[in-house]
Image (cartoon, grey):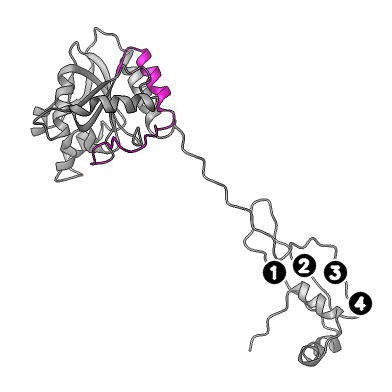
């Protein structure tokens, strides 16, 4: 049988009380031999700024407790540091804004590369369109994953996004919202964008599904005709082009050619309105 030492505080308490019965008998050999009971305990693993305490207690007629600071047995462990809350500057919107500001500030006479893919190039090696003289724009996808944007949900805008959009509009770049909703929903969607403060003046454009259209790619193709799209923001890669939904080899040359645009024209961000 393995005998475990009593905790220091318990030994002192027992030594000070009149003991009888089995407990007294168990302590007699210790008192008779004048043995010194020691207990060395490492209080947990050594923590930052806190050393392990090793109290020593002598039991006998001359029992003394050395002047050491002993942590109470029920002392609470320090709470783990809380994770820093995510802000609007570390969720992709800041990078999106910086990219648009840099691209939007390029000289107007110089050719600008669009963030939209040239569809004919998908048969070989994908490349993006070259803008002509269209107005420059930022496309923001509102759909949550593969589900169309829900007009009935109480809207809550992504933190910090309104400030980024205000700065972008100040350069003359248009903000265009897209969603897999019918064009008949454009008025309701505009009301929500106003209410959230993402388009407080109601000057942004929306691109929704026209009659007969069933795919968001059809919206993107129309955007290429009317806008020089500097960047696209969405919560999934399929928001940039539907080719991502049909890749057979995610590590093949087509996938690698597409991946170079993520973070450089294509920006993965949280839903703008939750």
Question: Marks 3/4: CA distance?
Answer: 10 Å
| Left or right of 65, for residue 98 | left
User: Which residue is pictured at 14% across the width and 19% down the height?
Assistant: 225
2 or 3: tag closer to the N-terminus: 2
4 or 2: tag closer to the N-terminus: 2
Judged from this view, the residue extending furthest toward the right is 62
1 or 4: tag closer to the N-terminus: 1
The residue segment tinted magenta is: 145-174
Q: x, y (%) of residue 15? A: 84, 80
**Tag 1–tag 2 contact (CB < 8 Å):** yes
Instruction: Say if the magenta span includes residue 100.
Output: no
User: Which residue is pictured at 8% across the width and 28% down the height?
Assistant: 120
User: Which residue is pictured at 15% across the width and 37% down the height?
Assistant: 243
Judged from this view, the residue extending furthest toward the top is 109
Q: Which residue is mark 1?
A: 41
Question: Marks 1/3: CA distance?
Answer: 16 Å
Residue 124 seen in the figure:
no
Residue 253: quadrant of the picture: top left
Q: Which residue is mark 3?
A: 65
Instruction: Say if the magenta span includes residue 155.
Output: yes
User: Which residue is pictured at 79% across the width and 60% down the height?
Assistant: 69
Q: Which residue is mark 4?
A: 62
Q: In the figure, 262 relative to 187: above or below?
A: below
Q: Which residue is mark 2?
A: 55
Main SS class of the magenta portion in the image: loop
**Tag 2–tag 3 contact (CB < 8 Å):** yes
The quadrant of the image that shows the N terminus is: bottom right
Q: Residues within 10 Å of mark 4 (few under 14, many from 20)?
A: few
Q: Residues within 10 Å of mark 2 (few under 14, many from 20)?
A: some
**Front residue of 51 and 246:** 246
């Amino acid at each position: 049988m393995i005998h475990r030492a009593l905790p220091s505080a318990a030994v002192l308490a027992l030594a000070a009380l009149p003991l009888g019965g089995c407990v007294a008998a168990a302590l007699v050999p210790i008192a008779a031999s004048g043995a010194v009971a020691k207990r060395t305990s490492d209080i947990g693993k050594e923590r930052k700024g806190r050393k392990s305490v090793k109290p020593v207690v002598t039991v006998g007629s001359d029992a003394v407790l050395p002047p050491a600071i002993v942590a109470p047995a029920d002392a609470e462990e320090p709470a783990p540091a809380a994770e820093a809350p995510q802000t609007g500057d570390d969720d992709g919107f800041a990078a999106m804004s910086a990219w648009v500001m840099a691209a939007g500030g390029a000289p107007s006479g110089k050719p600008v590369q669009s963030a939209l893919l040239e569809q004919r190039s998908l048969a070989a090696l994908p490349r993006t369109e070259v803008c002509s003289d269209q107005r420059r724009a930022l496309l923001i996808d509102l759909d949550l994953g593969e589900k169309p944007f829900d007009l009935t949900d109480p809207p809550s805008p992504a933190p910090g996004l309104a400030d980024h959009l205000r700065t972008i509009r100040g350069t003359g770049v248009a903000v265009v919202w897209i969603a897999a909703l019918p064009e008949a929903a454009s008025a309701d969607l505009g009301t929500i964008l106003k209410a959230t403060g993402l388009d407080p003046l109601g000057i942004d454009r929306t691109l929704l599904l026209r009659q007969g259209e069933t795919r968001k790619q059809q919206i993107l193709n129309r955007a290429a005709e009317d806008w020089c799209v500097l960047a696209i923001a969405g919560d999934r890669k399929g928001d940039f082009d539907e080719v991502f939904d049909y890749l057979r080899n995610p590590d093949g040359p087509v996938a690698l050619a597409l991946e170079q645009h993520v973070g450089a024209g294509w920006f993965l961000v949280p839903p703008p309105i939750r």
